[in-house]
Image (tube, grey):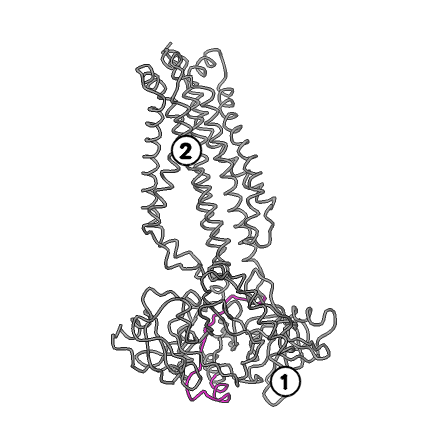
Amino acid sequence: STSFEALAVNSQWQPTLQGGGDPERLNGQRVTKDFFSVFGVRPFLGRDFTAEENVRAQRFVVILSYGLWQRRFGGDPSIVGKPVVLNETQYLVVGVMPRSYENLISPTAELWAPLGYDLSLSYACRTCHHLGEYGRLKPGVSPEAARKELDVISGRLVAQYPTEYAAPGMLVTPLQELLTQNAKPALLAVLGAVGLVLLIACANVSSLLLGRAMQREGEFAIRGALGAKRGRVVRQLLTESVMLSLVGGAAGIALAWAGIRGLKAIAPPNLPRLGAIGIDAGVLGFTAGVSILTGLLFGLIPAFATARPDLFAALRPGGRHTGQRSKRTARAILVGAEVALAVMLLTGAGLLMRSLERMLSVDPGFDPKNLITMAVSTTGARYSDNESTWAFWDRTLEAVRAVPGVEMAAWTSQIPLGGNFDRYGVQIQGKLLAHPEEAPSADRFSVTPDYLQTMRIPLKRGRGFTAADVRNNPLVVLIDENLARIGWGGADPIGAKVQFGGPDQPWRTVVGIVRTVQHTALDQDQAGQLYIPESQGQFADGGMDLAVRTRGDPAALAAQVRAAIKSVDPTQPILGVATMEQVLSSTAQQRRFTFVLFQIFAVVALLLAAAGIYGVLAGSVTERTREIGIRSALGAPRSGLLGMVVRQGLTLASIGLLVGTAGALGLTQFLRKMLFGIGARDPVTFAGVVVVLGAVAFAACLAPALRATRVSPLEALRGE
């Protein structure tokens, strides 16, 4: 390829750091020598990797993150050149990355070693899809141009290896798009909600300023009579509006400063660059700009509406109480706009709430109650062969089952919703495909016999695993309902043979069908799933997840279960301790985050809309005091006066509800990607919003209406 300045490949790496404290499994990466060059960074201590170190025999050097260097090595300035022990193998520290370096590809990675890819290993296949490639484009080269060149190169590979690839073509994705594609819908929705709240607040302030300006008509009339030009009055009112907006912006910054910690606490961990969220010069400048802009834009309505009053009407006795029809119309329009915007926000919040409820009510395919999990790794020379590793899993399982309060326990190569996957293409005997990539995909679970019972995953047909399904007996496999449907349609798969992991892997007989488990996420369609007995694997899994079903609170037994594992081998790391209910809850974090923010904004919008209606009606009662007094003197009943004011407020609210509902029908389409189980035009949500906002509007009308009924005719007419 001629499109790139540099190219690099990486794979995930989870070594166990030993020595200087408890063993700790770390998240890391194995990378080719140009990896840091692609991202434009260099170690601030030591050096980068060399080409000679990128071979399997020479790859025992490591670069540390700044955080790991400080946490485990005390920031030792002489760390470069010193050995560290990873997986009971000595590595030489050759560098430390800068404190400012953010690993965007794998944010939790704390150390890096050369990839040293060995083509002779079993996983070195062209269809394994276990490596990531990153490149820095040359100046002037677009991603589309790079993709076209790579398509040509991939076409040559297809011609050279026709059985390995189904078709030519490569994906070229800008890094920013890759990092933000999952969080982008949520962030855009939050941005839209912020914008709506800002518009509602500005409309509310503009309405209040207009009402205040109407009360100052006499003042402006005197100014005009003394020679003040209209532009001078407009500048004064705009200055007042901008100053008010700047004070509000400053107060907002203070609230934001206090609220950032809470925002980070509820934000999902996969939110890009969560740690970088803060208030800096850019945020302060943006806030000042928005404050000035909103102060000018929303100060124009009261400024121009009041800058040229009717001198005769304003200066005659009682004239300032009459107001002007155009100003009252402007205030009514602003309040209607507030209500309409509030409808849009409340509808969005309602849809997200119902979507979250639907997602959390999804049956995960297992029973998460009284279930705790933790991950365990086997590292070191003593576990270099399969038999030793299998023996370790057996001994620890016996120790855990002996803990008082443990009902059942089992090992699995991956826990549902745990964020990991081990996926293969599945070949079905009698339905062999020419291209392996066209085979249906399935997640592989290597489990001990009691796993289904521990997780309470229902067996639909056939049989589960038994103690007889061991290494020397016929190889068996369980499949889920999804894979049975994809691979066999309506036919019976019991007794059929399947193969996964490549043409050199053995064939296994399907002995049972189990319920599909939500493994990737609660709101996503699942690939097929297959289960094999851990003792019949081609190799022993070096890392397993323990599932423990307890008779009481599972979290209360976590320490005892950890102690049982440590009693077998205290040098092996244990991490990821969590109840399955916590795991389930974490899968909804992004939706919950967006919903909580929408909920906050919707409540603010509701209060602002209520305040706007109240303010307009209160001002209207004040302006119409003389009229109300005359009506009362002529015998108008209190109920009539009450109904007159309430009707005025509900008319404004009704117009806003109609306009807002129409707007919400369009805007909620942008929330489609974030919804689950309901449509963007869910009638229950729309009806609920109308009822809630209508009730709030009615409550906001009552106080001014009751005040109107208490107007005394003598007080109202005394000024005459």
User: N-terminal of the two: label 1 or label 2?
Assistant: 2
Q: Which residue is found at the position 69% from the left and 76% from the top?
A: 433
Residue at 53% x, 46% y is: 350
Residue 342, position in %: x, y? Answer: 49, 39
Give the SS element for disc 2. Answer: loop
Q: Nearer the viewer, residue 711 or 81?
A: 81
Q: Which mark is residue 298?
A: 2
Task: Using a 10 Å C-alpha cutoff, classify the residue at mark 1 as few (fewer than 14 neighbours), some (14 to 19) or many (20 or more).
Answer: few
In magenta segment, residue 383? yes
> Up-down: is 599 above or below 164?
above
Compared with residue 571, is residue 685 higher up or lower down, i.e. above or below? above
Q: Which residue is mark 1?
A: 506
The outermost residue toward the left is 77
Q: Nearer the viewer, mark 1 or mark 2?
A: 2
Quarter-of-image position of residue 44? bottom left
Separation of disc 1 and disc 2 at Cα? 73 Å
The foreground one among 559 and 330 is: 330
Residue 605 quadrant:
top left
Residue 75 place in picture, x, y as percent: 26, 72
Q: Position of residue 460 (x, y in %)?
A: 66, 71
Is residue 495 something that shows in the picture? no
